[in-house]
Amino acid sequence: MHFDCKTDVDDLHSAAGLITLLSHADYDRVKYHAVAGTYGTQEGLYVPPNDLFQLAFGNNWTDAHNNFESAAEKVKAIALKSLKSGGDVWIAEAGQSDFSAILVKSLMKDIPDLNLSERIHIVQHSNWNEEVTSTESLEFVKEHTDYQKIPDGNATGNGTPGFRTPGYSGWKDKITNDKLFQVWQLAVDIGNRYNGSEDRYNNEAVADGGLDFSDLSEVCWILGLQDINGTEEFFERFAQ
């Protein structure tokens, strides 16, 4: 899962949602990797997620904020293991496609005979994310990968779960696992600290005391969980 973390704090909540879902017994064998700082051409300040990502993912994440290309090399090595063993790679774009384009170009150099358009699947849910991806990068991933544009995860009733819920704090009563509770609390705390700060995007759902982990809709799409009906049902099904 590729997180732009610029300039919306929703990626923090989405990271907490990802580790919550993948900690559930039904999905704890899913092989995943998180990447922070996969932003495109948008202006504005970065939302530093390092403390949260370290708590949530341990060493299973990469920081692309400091160096896109070296991060892409690290993630390429992970992707190669799956591709060479006959598996596919699925990328949930919690942001833009510029990092994915660098990654795919690097993979093409290493394994030119592999049909990446059938083996690498990119799932995107946001018109805005596409608009602030560089034109070259967006055209490249659409041409050279299985690029899937799904309905927006900020809304409900459109075929994907809607995980943007103003005023929602019910997670505090649902999550009983201490580690997951710490992850969500830190995600909320960092989100509240940076939301709208220094001209960053002001996420109204977060400002209203709620949650926005809308980017997780892409992971739910990949795993066939499109039937989840919003935030409350997500926690009822996967909180522990």
Image (cartoon, grey):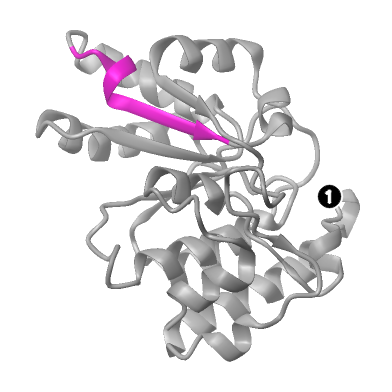
Up the image or down, 170 lies above or below 141; here it is below
Q: Which residues are magenta?
A: 114-124
Q: Amino acid at mark 1?
A: Tyr
Foreground: 176 or 237?
A: 237
Where, quadrant-wise, is the C terminus in this rendering? bottom left
Q: Is residue 16 left or right of residue 112?
A: right
Task: Tell whether position 122 is magenta.
Answer: yes
Residue at point 86% right, 59% down? 204
Q: Is residue 194 left or right of residue 163?
A: right
- Residue 1 appears in view: no
Judging from the image, what secondary structure is the residue with disc 1 in? loop
Crowd band around label 1 with a 10 angstrom C-alpha radius: few (<14), some (14–19), many (20+)? some
Residue 31 horizontal/vertical position (percent):
26, 52
Residue at point 83% right, 50% down? 200
Task: Tell whether position 67 is magenta.
Answer: no
Residue 154 horizontal/vertical position (percent):
70, 49
- Name the residue at the right extreme: 199
Q: Pointer 1: what residue?
A: 201
Q: Is residue 66 left or right of residue 106?
A: right
Residue 134 horizontal/vertical position (percent):
65, 18
Up the image or down, 190 lies above or below 32; here it is below
Residue at point 53% right, 83% down? 182
Quarter of the rendering containing residue 129:
top right
Residue 43 horizontal/vertical position (percent):
79, 34
- Residue 94 appears in view: yes
Residue at point 70% right, 76% down? 189
Quarter of the rendering containing residue 90:
top left
